[in-house]
Image (tube, grey):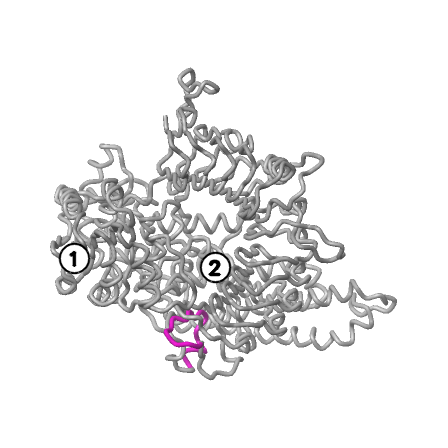
Amino acid sequence: MAAILGSLVGTCAKRLQEIITEEAVLILGVNKGLRDLQRTMTQIQCFLNDAEERRTEESAVNNWLGELKDAMYYADDIIDLVRFEGGKLLAEHNSSSTKATECGGISFFTCIPSCKKRHDIAIKIRDFNGELEKISELGAQFLKLQSMQHKAEAPLVKQMRTCHLVEPNLVGKETLHACTRLVELVLRQEDKKAYKVGITGTGGVGKTTLAQKICNDQKIKGAFSNQAWICVSQEYSEVALLKEVLRNFGVHQEQGETVGELSSKLAEAIRGKSFFLVLDDVWQSQVRTNLLRVPLHAAATGVILVTTRHDTVAHVIGVEDVHRVELMALNVGWELLWKSMNINQENDVQNLRHIGLEIVRKCGGLPLAIKVTASVLATKERTQNEWRKIMERSAWSMCNLPIELRGALYLSYDDLPRHLKQCLLYLILYPEDQYMYRDYLIRLWVAEGFVEEHKGQLLEDTAEEYYYELIYRNLLQLDPLRFDRSMCKMHDLLRQLAQHFSRDENYCGDPQSLQVTTLSKLRRVSVVTDKDSLMLPNVDKEKIRARTLLIHSTKKLSVENTIFKRLPCIRVLDLTGSSIKSIPDCVGGLIHLRLLDLDETAISCLPESIGSLTNLQILNLQRCKALHSLPSSITQLCNLRRLGLGGTPINQVPKGIGKLEFLNDLEGFPIGGTSDDANTQDGWKLEELGHLSQLRQLDMIKLERAAPSTTNSLFLRDKKYLKFLNLWCSQRKEEPNSDDISNIEKIFEQLIPPHNLEKLIIVNFFGRGYPTWLGTSIHLSSTTYLNLTDCTYCAHLPAIWQLASLRYLKIVGATAITKIGPEFVGCGEANPIESTEAVAFPKLEYLVIKDMPNWSEWS
């Protein structure tokens, strides 16, 4: 707790330093009180290092930390309040037409009603200062003052982004032999109706790693038309599990579908086909015997690979062959340790062998423990002295923990820098074994204030580095079937560890089962329920201090719009997929709100009061089928960083989106701009992107409605942060005429991306030829992912063989193509690759070409 509090105290102190000189705060006249707060926080920071070392052994320290935590959350709320009320006063002052008589810098007409508000805020700050000073004095009685400086962390990001994280690390002759044997066993049974093979062993012993290696085998991938990887938690939802199987098989699902409907859809999807299905971490045999047996029977052939800790589960499921994974021998464990650290020098392997074997022995032969320990060692110098310091750390012998969480697992958490600790603990808000989307985690961490600012770098890019560092440290596991590393989950043992350290403020489950006193202490609640409606215990709103409310439900959960009145401290509110139909005006009073997610809801409008949410950073309105317009006050959301509109039929938007200078993520951005109205239009013009200098992700739709620039402006070329670009034209029912074709080709020519672009998707482009920049390494030198879908009028592919960073290429629905010749790999007459040192597709790993009925020749 002390480590996380260190981040919270530091963040509050920094925010105080920033706002003290702001004009909106000066106008309130509370500067002295805020400076006193800052001074007390700085003193408290000096106690936290000592508190961190003693927190698990002394109850007095833990009690003090609990008081301090509550105080810091309240301080964070006060900072928001000061900014909000000061901003309102400043706006009133600036708009007031009578400024002859002033009161403290405020016009007379503004002064009278604002005096009480200013007085109330000053009293709040004064009283809180007194409470915080008492906490500081109490800490001084039993904690030592230490320097605020904490240890520097070794930078891992550069290594992480270049290594092949998905590939599991198999070591030892027996393990490699087992992998080969199981692959051959599966291939020999590929003609069977439903062959079942099992991998058993204790938690963390490497069952999933072995299964991943089998799943990634090229011969396995080529033998089955459908492949799926499903994690099965102890308390799984039948609906969620069936949806995950369908998602893996590429089948769309609707909200609210029943088990019967999903089962029928699954049976139809694999009827007459073959499948390879991994059921990972199975605790109950019913998942196969009751839920999947009937729909999977529709397939022509199939293999099910089951991993489980319990031999009895494998037996009841009816697996025909079982491989048991045992604990690692000492030498094999040492091999795993140095290979996990990418130690390639033989001298290092030999010099560190003795101390390395001692460390492996402390890990008890458990691969998970060895790998997380390797990640700790990777941040240190490769010397015996540094490694011995790690081996002698007190974290190995921490007593006040469940037995299974001691030793290496706790060491891996203890070694994390403060900002990563709070990011890791936050993940227990996801149900066990549920995969988490990278991009959404990034947004959550930003909204919670966990991400440190670095000059010249977006918060989202920093948060993405956090994500990859947690993966590199083996604290998160990637989805083995995802090329782009965009999904991950926590091992259940590490999740238990995170639960242990965040149990007082983070909760994942049905809130209806909580006691009133428990709910009043929680700061973050994740709703996991099979009920039809969201029910919170009957607690006065003053006692609900939750900063986060997330919903994880397979049903369309009924949510009353009165919930907005019951959550005065809320910062993150995710109502995705709920049945809420209207947003009340009182939403404008949620001054702390940073993230509002209304994806897949039935809302038809947003109130103008939403413009009062000056702290709002993320607004998600995707797949809201009844929502057709955005309020004009959207342009007042001065801190907005993401606006998600994908799949929502928006046809009326306010002018002035370019005013939102922090906006860096636009999804479902509708192009248009034709309107006689002074304030609204049917979509935004491409020119309005000009002022959005921080764009990182851009997803544009209806590009056929754009007008080419008469000055040959390059709308995207200067977007130095842009990494992900999706360009969509609407699906056409009629053949395009020559003017339409000419227009769309000109538009795409003017959408030259910056050289830092990593991912490009083009859909429904109806020009006769691709834009010239698409086949040049100059403009796409950093691009790793390219998807060309339903570009039905282009008869030739661009010269994409030149893209030196490209790892994934997908071409779908290119119906005009009849032949792919040697020019595809740079061997045509126009670009004879033989005469140069260039190599075609030097990094390409995945090539997908499908739905091209007229393609008849590849020469």
- Vertical side of 560 occupied by 726: above or below: above
- Vertical side of 336 occupied by 230: above or below: below
Label 2 – label 1 distance at C-alpha? 35 Å
Residue 705 shown left or right of residue 435 in the figure: right
Front position in the image: 283 or 547: 283
Query: Mark 2 belongs to which amino acid?
Result: Leu
Which residue is at the far front? Answer: 734
**Quarter-of-image position of residue 432:** bottom left
Q: Give the range drawn in magenta.
A: 517-533
Query: Mark 1 belongs to which amino acid?
Result: Gly
Front position in the image: 145 or 247: 247
Dot 2: element: helix
Q: Is residue 532 magenta?
A: yes
- Vertical side of 230 occupied by 217: above or below: above
Judging by the rendered image, the residue that carries numbered circle 1 is 201
Q: Residue at x 45, y 18 (%)?
A: 829
Residue 197 shown left or right of residue 77 in the figure: left
Front position in the image: 286 or 694: 286
Picture coordinates of residue 560 (x, y %)?
A: 52, 77
Picture coordinates of residue 715 (x, y %)?
A: 63, 40
If the image is split into quadrants, where does the N terminus sit?
Answer: bottom left
Judging by the rendered image, the residue that carries numbered circle 2 is 444
**Quarter-of-image position of residue 527:** bottom left
Picture coordinates of residue 391 (x, y %)?
A: 25, 51
| Residue 142 shows in this picture | no
